[in-house]
Structures are given as structure tokens and as C-alpha cells.
């Protein structure tokens, strides 16, 4: 073999040996770090990437998330009454369902409504959210059926936004069950 073939072979071996990362805990070298690790935004923080300046955006109109069933009721007073009268929670208040409801309440509801459901959540108490959330311990809430709570979680009410696009229907029922059976 001539000298150029040895240089080429040696160069190929050097490239192969130096291009591998021997640390099995990483994926190797990153050449476009900003593309692999984008800047994260918290849900309720301002975001200049969107026209309305909010990070948490509603789903694209006309789309249905995978595994979700379209909801038949709108965010109106009439539909709220109708939903409370017609919807039925078919889940039993088992310890597992109540525990799952408590966990989902902690993720989606506690920041506004508080750990005890009294409306003294961290967003309101810290003055990050100016409107007082509803107390889930009020006489009005105690009189409302689980279906009403399910409807409000799904489409929202007043200044509360909808959470139906984020929480599967079964988990919404479990949250409503937890509120009615454990918080009140």
C-alpha cells in the first residue's frame, strides 16, 4: 500500500474513535443545543411567542385530542343546568378512585382553589391571580351535584378556564367525586 492509503485509513480510524462518546448516560455531543433543549415556560407565565402573550394556549379550534370524546354542552348557564341534571358519574367512590381524584385535584385545582378547597390557593394568596377563586366548601357548592362540578371542570365557569382539553373525562369525574366526598 502506498502512503496515502495509510494516511486515509489512519484518518478514518481516528475519526471513528473520536466521534463516539463512551459515556452511556448521554446521547453524545450536541451541536445545536438550543434545538435539542428549548426554553421552557411555566403554564401561567407571560410568553412573547404568542399574540395574546400567554403561555397556556387553548387547543386548536376543531381538533379533538386523542382519547377524548367531544363534549355535548357549552359554557352557558342553560347548559350548566342541563349537564347537572343529565350527566351521571358511573364510577364508584372507591379508595383508589378518590385517591386518583385527590392527586388530579392537586395537579389541576389546588393552585387556585387551595389545598382544602377554600379558595385560598397559592396563585390567589401570592397575588399572582387577582380574582378570588370559588370556595368549594360553600353551601352552593355543597348543594351542587358531581355532574355540575364535572361540567365546570370541562368548560369552565366565570373567569375559570376550561380544563376539559387537559384532563381525561374519567379523571374529571374522579376530581368531582373527590370534591364531593372528601373536601365537603
Image: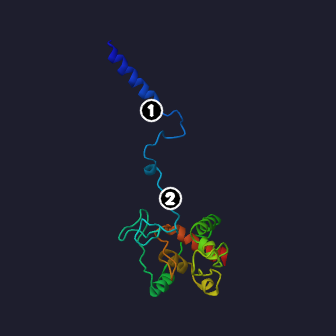
Q: Quadrant of the C terminus?
A: bottom right
Counting residues from the start of the chain, the first of labels 2 and 1 encountered is 1
Picture quadrant where residue 66 is located: bottom left
Q: Is residue 129 left or right of residue 81?
A: right
Question: What secondary structure is marked by label 1?
Answer: helix
Among the 4 quarters of the image, the one containing residue 107: bottom right
Which residue bears the numbered disc 2?
40
User: Mark 1 highlights which residue?
Assistant: 19
Q: Residue at x 63, y 79 (%)?
A: 119
Relative to 39, residue 99 above or below: below
Considering depth in this image, is 55 or 176 the residue closer to the camera? Answer: 55
Instruction: Give the camera-side residue of 5 and 141.
Output: 5
> Residue farthest to the top?
1
- Give the x, y percent position of residue 112: 59, 74
At 50% from the left and 72% from the top, the residue drawn is: 163
Spot occupied by residue 140 in the image (x, y as percentages of width and height):
61, 87
- Name the residue rendered at 66%, 72% in the picture: 115
Whole-angstrom CA distance, mark 2 to mark 1, is 30 Å
Viewer-nearest residue: 42 or 133: 42
Residue at 61%, 67% (x, y): give it: 106
Amino acid at each position: 500500500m502506498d502512503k496515502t492509503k495509510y494516511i486515509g485509513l489512519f484518518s478514518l480510524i481516528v475519526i471513528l474513535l473520536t466521534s463516539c462518546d463512551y459515556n452511556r448516560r448521554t446521547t453524545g455531543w450536541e451541536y445545536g443545543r438550543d434545538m435539542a433543549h428549548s426554553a421552557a415556560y411555566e403554564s401561567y407565565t407571560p410568553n412573547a411567542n404568542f399574540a395574546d402573550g400567554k403561555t397556556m394556549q387553548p387547543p386548536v379550534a376543531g381538533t379533538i385530542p386523542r382519547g377524548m370524546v367531544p363534549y355535548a354542552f357549552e359554557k352557558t348557564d342553560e347548559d350548566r343546568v342541563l349537564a347537572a341534571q343529565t350527566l351521571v358519574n358511573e364510577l364508584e367512590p372507591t379508595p383508589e378512585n378518590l385517591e386518583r381524584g385527590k392527586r388530579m385535584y392537586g395537579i389541576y385545582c389546588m393552585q387556585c382553589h387551595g389545598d382544602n378547597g377554600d379558595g385560598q390557593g397559592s396563585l390567589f394568596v401570592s397575588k399572582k391571580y387577582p380574582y378570588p377563586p370559588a370556595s368549594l366548601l360553600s353551601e352552593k357548592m355543597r348543594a351542587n351535584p358531581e355532574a355540575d362540578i364535572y361540567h365546570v371542570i370541562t368548560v369552565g365557569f366565570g373567569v375559570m378556564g376550561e380544563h376539559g382539553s387537559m384532563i381525561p373525562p374519567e379523571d374529571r369525574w374522579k376530581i368531582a367525586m373527590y370534591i364531593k366526598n372528601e373536601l365537603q
